[in-house]
Image (spheres, rainbow, N blue to C red):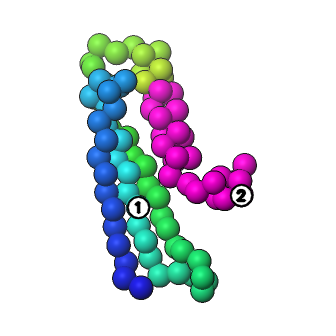
Amino acid sequence: MTKSVLRVDLQLPETPGGLLVLQQYLDQPLEEGKANVILDLDHHLVIPESASQNDIRMMIDSLREVKNKTFISCLSPQTQEMIS
């Protein structure tokens, strides 16, 4: 099997200056008949210098929600059942 990498950069319209970088790595299977997939989600956010600690915390919480929704949407229904 050939290794592959997929990278998608998504602008976050609900978060000004927000960017979600989704990277998926397909590697050699660890067991026959199974896939070895690494899913990496990164966020980039521009935080104004005038932002308060509370503003920063709210931005981080907002990004965490987006990250969690994105992660779950990348999983098959069978995998979602396995981890819930």
The magenta segment is 60-84
Q: Main secondary structure of the magenta part?
A: helix
Identity of the residue drawn at 56% across and 46% down: 72
Q: Secondary structure at mark 2?
A: helix
Residue nearer the viewer, 80 or 47 = 80
Residue 84 visible in the shown view: yes
Position of residue 33 relative to residue 48, above or below, is: below
* Badge 2 or badge 1: first in the primary sequence: 1
Find out whether the residues at labels 2 and 1 contact each other: C-beta distance under 8 Å: no
Near-viewer residue (40 or 12): 12
**Residue placed at 34% from the left, 15% from the top?**
51
**Residue highlighted by disc 1:** 24
On the image, the x and y values in percent for residue 1 come to 42, 85
Measuring from the top left, give residue 22's x and y in whole percent: 38, 51
Q: Residues within 10 Å of mark 1 (few under 14, many from 20)?
A: some
Q: Residue furthest front?
A: 77
Q: Nearer the viewer, residue 35 or 45?
A: 35
SS state under label 1 = strand
Crowd tier of the residue under label 2, counting other residues whose Cα lies within 10 Å: few below 14, some 14–19, many 20 or above: few
Answer with left or right where residue 60 lies relative to residue 48. Answer: right
Q: Residue at x 33, y 62 (%)?
A: 6
Image position, residue 79 (x, y; %): 64, 58
Q: Which residue type does callout 2 highlight?
A: Met
Badge number at residue 78: none
Q: Residue at x 27, y 28 (%)?
A: 17
The residue to which callout 2 is attached is 82
Vertical placement of residue 58 versus 7, above or below: above
Q: Is residue 45 visible?
A: no
